[in-house]
Amino acid sequence: MTLPPREVHFRPLGCGGSPAGPPTAAGQNPLHLTLVTETYAPEINGVAMTLGRLVDGLALRGHRLTVIRPRQRHESPRFSVTQRLACRQVRLPGIPLPGYPQLRLGLPAGRRLRQLWTLNRPDLVHVATEGPLGASAIATARRLGLPVTSSFHTNFDQYTRDYRLGWLHPLVAAWLRRVHNQTLRTFVPTRDLAQRLALAGYRNLRLLSRGVDTALFSPLRRDEELRARWGAGPDDPVVLHVGRLAAEKNYPLLFRAFDAFRAAEPRARLVLVGDGPLLSACQRQRPDAVFTGFYTGVNLARHYASGDVYLHGSTTETFGNVITEALASGLALGAYDYAAAHEFVRPEENGLLAAPGHEVAFLGQAARLGRDRALRSRLRLAAPASVATQSWDAVIDRFAADLAEASADFQDRRTAGSSLTTLHPQPSSSPP
């Protein structure tokens, strides 16, 4: 069963299109920050959503933002600049990502970036993605003597296995390490990832977690009319999943897990919220599932809260915003002990966890959730409290302070007459 997607609405606030908290960090000098990224709103994915939150939050705190990104499919082919509130967007040429035409890949833009930053020099450049555009931004910033930091948002090296390009894994891993080690700081979303990257040779690691909007994602948004459209009665359990329909999300395992759940609870329904290159294949494979398309904002929150169980079989995310959104929405969670689930789930209290890669254990916990209604109810009741204090305000305040520290350290060393190479120091790899 397939439902037609509704119109998606965005709420542009600064440049990111996401609501953020009130200004804080009184006494902190405002900075002119440039963010370079291959993905951004209105593209819908975890990285774009996170960057939108950060940009809006930094703008509300008095910082001046410039976002440099590839043009998206619907935008004019000409070079363009858009100004909105405290943020301007610079759109540069890009090409469709091979195998995923909904996303764009930025092209090297060293010459254009030199022109922009010579005319309007930022205080700090932050590179959020490691593609050709991001790599050229790091190289250009270093040549111009600008402080530059980076984020590790995506395990691209792991994607090589999902797309049957495993022979490229060592090359991609080396590329990512080289790109990030040229920056003053590499921000990562979890301590576990920081430890793994440190062992892989990454330096200058800092923690940048993810917030969750608990006013938006809440069990109170449960909608029985929406459930009825899915074919679910008041007591019929709905297994929900939100995300890109792409190879790295491990949908074959998700489908097997749902079958294990339904074997114990025949009235169960499977609802998939999202879109992507595997949509048609998944629809053919699972005609019994509901495919809703992408949603954002209140509509997305309604979908989460109208489910009962969230199964997540992927191990490629660096965080997984869907995990905290599902917990905030009051869903019983079954996932691998990885990324956000590792950070926020207390096994048997607010979710069930399987060791990463142990498919038998993952399928077993799905079957257990299907046959044990009391367990589902207990996990659902405990889930929202586990992320109640994970606010975006706290995350953005810390990020702003870390960027200010990086900029100040860079300027202090420059004033002291350090060489360009020593202007990118290598402190401890462990995040504070």
Image: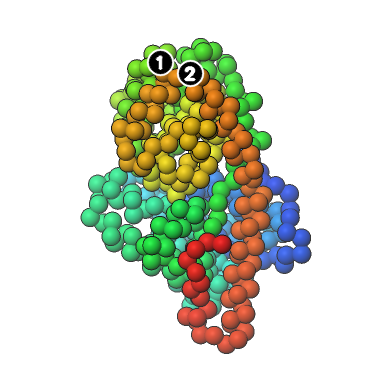
- Foreground residue among 150 and 200: 200
Q: CA distance from mark 2 to mark 1?
A: 9 Å
Residue at 47% in and 44% down? 342
Residue that label 2 marks: 373
For label 2, the crowd category at 10 Å Cα-Cα, with few meaning under 14, some 14 to 19 and many 20 or more, is few
Q: Quadrant of the C terminus?
A: bottom right
Q: Are marks 2 and 1 in contact (CB under 8 Å)?
A: yes
Residue 180 visible to the viewer: yes
- Foreground residue among 386 and 303: 386
On screen, residue 193 above or below 426: above
Residue 210 percent coordinates (x, y): 56, 48
First in sequence: mark 2 vs mark 1: 1
Q: Which residue extends farthest bottom?
A: 417
Q: Which residue extends farthest right?
A: 27
On screen, residue 272 above or below 12: above
Marker disc for residue 265: 1
Q: Is residue 408 left or right of residue 273?
A: right
Marker disc for residue 136: none
Disc 2 marks a residue whose amino acid type is: Arg
Disc 1 marks a residue whose amino acid type is: Glu
Residue at 63% in and 57% down? 398
Q: Is residue 265 left or right of residue 191?
A: left
Residue at 54% in and 57% down? 207
